[in-house]
Structure formats: C-alpha cells, structure tokens
Image (cartoon, grey):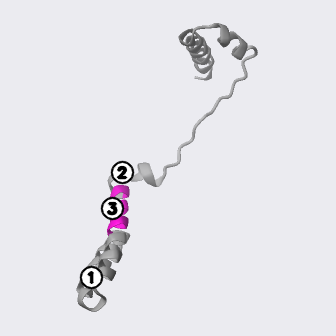
C-alpha cells in the first residue's frame, strides 16, 4: 500500500468513527492527514525532481590574482563580462 493509499484509508476510517470520537477529535486529525496528503500529492506531481536525482558533474574553482581589486575600478557589467570571457576560455579547453 502506498503512502497516499494509507492516508486515504486513515481519512475514511476516521470519518467512520466520527460519532464515537467526536467532531473535534476527527476534524483535528483529518486536518493533519489532509496536509500530509497534499504534500504526498505534490511529490507525486513533481516526480524525481523533488525526490532526488544523482548526476555526475565537474566543478572548477579559479583564484584569479588581483580580480577583486580590478573589479573595484570597473563598472559591474564590465567586471561580469571580463570574468565570463575568462570562464568561456577556460571551459573551451576542457572540451
């Protein structure tokens, strides 16, 4: 039985026990179960993207001497263009 089916079964069981347990107890319990059901449905809707997926990646770290001092004198757009050009050149050598 899936978690969704277990929650749906618990909801039906609680509803059937309303006269014995009372409205307040059932309503509080149902609120918690319905929240959990919504979370399970959200996980189902997004599939493996939220459940986790393993991928192999390559990460490159670069320490560019004098970069901070240089960017302090540049317009932010020019600093970004400079670092992007450096990264493009470095990554083209990896291919």
Is disc 2 surrounded by few (<14), some (14 to 19) or many (20+) residues within 10 Å? Answer: few
Is disc 3 surrounded by few (<14), some (14 to 19) or many (20+) residues within 10 Å? Answer: few
Q: Secondary structure at mark 3?
A: helix
Q: Which residue is the extreme one toward the bottom? A: 20
Q: Quadrant of residue 9?
A: bottom left
The one nearer the camera, 64 or 20, is: 20
Q: Secondary structure at mark 1?
A: helix
Residue drawn at (68%, 28%), measured in percent from left and top?
A: 61
Vertically, is 25 above or below 33?
A: below
Tell me the magenta residue range: 34-43
Q: Position of residue 35 (x, y in %)?
A: 35, 65
Q: Nearer the viewer, mark 2 or mark 3?
A: 3
The quadrant in which the C terminus is found is top right
Dot 3 or dot 1: first in sequence order is 1
Residue tagged 1: 23
Q: Nearer the viewer, mark 2 or mark 1?
A: 1
Do the numbered discs 3 and 1 sit on residues whose CB atoms are within 8 Å? Answer: no
Mark 3 to mark 1 CA distance (whole Å): 22 Å
Q: Image check: 52 left or right of 60?
A: left
Please give the count of numbered marks on the rendered protein. Answer: 3
Residue 38 tag number: 3
Is 38 magenta? The answer is: yes
Q: Secondary structure at mark 2?
A: helix
Q: Quadrant of residue 32?
A: bottom left
Q: Position of residue 74 (x, y in %)?
A: 62, 7
Residue tagged 2: 46
């Amino acid at each position: 039985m899936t978690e969704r089916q277990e929650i749906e079964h618990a909801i039906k069981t609680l509803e059937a026990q309303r006269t014995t347990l009372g409205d307040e107890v059932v309503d509080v319990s149902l609120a918690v179960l319905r929240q959990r059901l919504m979370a399970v449905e959200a996980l189902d809707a997004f599939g493996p993207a939220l459940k986790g997926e393993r991928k192999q990646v390559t990460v490159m770290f670069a320490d560019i001497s004098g970069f901070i001092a240089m960017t302090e004198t540049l317009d932010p757009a020019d600093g970004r263009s400079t670092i992007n050009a450096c990264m493009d050149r470095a990554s083209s050598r990896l291919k």
